[in-house]
Image: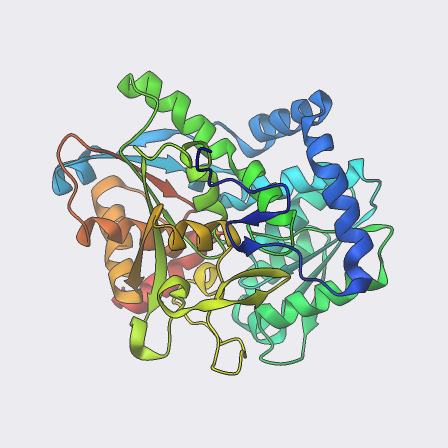
Amino acid sequence: MKKTYNINEKGYYGEFGGAFIPEMLYPNVEELRQNYLKIMADPSFKAEFDQLLKDYVGRPSPLYFAKRLSEKYHTKIYLKREDLNHTGAHKINNTIGQIIMAKRLGKHRIIAETGAGQHGVATATVCALMGLKCVVYMGEIDIARQAPNVARMKMLGATVIPATSGSKTLKDATNEAIRDWISNPTDTHYIIGSVVGPHPYPDMVARFQSVISEEIQKQLLEQEGISKPNYIVACVGGGSNAAGAFYHFLNDTQVHLIAVEAAGKGIHSGESAATSALGNIGIIHGSKTLLMQTKDGQITEPYSISAGLDYPGVGPMHAHLYQTNRAQFLSVTDDEAMVAGLELCKLEGIIPAIESAHALAVFNKKTFSPEDIVVLSLSGRGDKDLETYMKHFEL
Ligand SMILES: *Cc1c(COP(=O)(O)O)cnc(C)c1O
């Protein structure tokens, strides 16, 4: 049998995935599992999704040949410009897909968890678009740290509820969202923001984000006369922009996949989010995957200068890509990412999100040949990160 890196019928990538959920959540997750593929296969679903991606999000996002960056690193670098999407990142691809899914399941109320607020904003945006009620759970500490995104969510009509338990950050917000879903099983859909959570979420989110690699194939064919690159590089928090950029190349081993994780202040500093390097097998947010944990299985609080990458786990697809060596995993420190981010500003006139800047740091870690075509997922724009850039470089 040919090896495949896609999900199997049981909801697993190799040994990773599944749905480890409290019994009271079973009906909600099961309803989604039984219907998501059917709904996505409906031509009218696809038509609505494609039209919103085009007219509302602004897709296809350009595949931009970065000439000056390519000259500097003696290879051919293309940037997939997810930063040009409405709301400034790839996250909107998923929330558009899930809001249409929610409507077709007859749901009237949306809940979400958010860390830095980026997924909360993307969710509040599509709820406003569709006129659905939106409740976003966010750790109390994150609310204080991310005031502009809290303001955005409120302007978009969402209710932001602080999670006050535990460390008052993302994992506590996730716990609150799950509690809400258990109490509101019939009218509520939970929009998860990455390729994490119980099956079918990782697969559903990967499929919505797969528009990224679908476009890369077409655009490369037009621009290079070949539909696949030698390398695809993407940063990994939970793993959704990487999953989308890898998706149509997963089973083509001529295409090398590179996943970049946040090493924070250094892998061994105790302050990092390099899940594959530091993690081991466990269960987080309803799926079996790699996560950073103590010897007794307590989840370690992650750290990265980029709020979008400080997640203590990684989605099950990526755990499998790591374990099978299908993808190469690199880790990049705060400092390395910041330097790479500023370099893109100076060389190409593009201010990247600090998450995406982690992927850009690959060019200082690895040498590519002049004939190689390297496609890099520029997952988001850096407007939200100006303050962090200014502080870091004393601008
Ligand atoms: C949220 C975010 C990420 C990390 O999430 P993934 O699910 O790993 O893609 C990366 N880049 C940007 C700009 C983000 O907002």
Query: In screen coordinates, is 232 left or right of 86?
Result: left
Q: Position of residue 150 (x, y in %)?
A: 61, 62
Q: Residue most toward the right?
A: 186
The single residue placed furthest to the front in the displayed view is 1
Relative vertical location of residue 347 with respect to residue 290 in this rendering, above or below = above
Image quadrant occupied by the C terminus: bottom left
| Quarter of the image where one finds residue 369 | top left
- Give the camera-side residue of 299 and 295: 295
Nearer to the camera, 389 or 286: 286
Q: Is residue 155 above or below residue 266?
A: above
Quarter occupied by residue 98: top right
Q: Residue at x 75, y 45 (%)?
A: 32
What residue appears at the point 42 percent right and 54 percent down from the top-left corner? Answer: 236
Residue 122 position in % (x across, y down): 60, 48
Residue that appears at 21% across and 43% down: 347
Residue 137 falls left or right of residue 66: right
Q: As displayed, is residue 50 above or below residue 355? A: above
Residue drawn at x 75%, y 65% is 22
Residue 175's spot in the image, x, y percent?
68, 69
Give the percent coordinates (x, y) of residue 331: 30, 60
| Residue 265 visible, this angle | no
Q: Is residue 165 visible?
A: yes
Pick the front one: 258 or 74: 258
Q: How is the image coloured?
A: rainbow
> Residue 61 is drawn in which quadrant?
top left
Q: How many marks?
A: 0
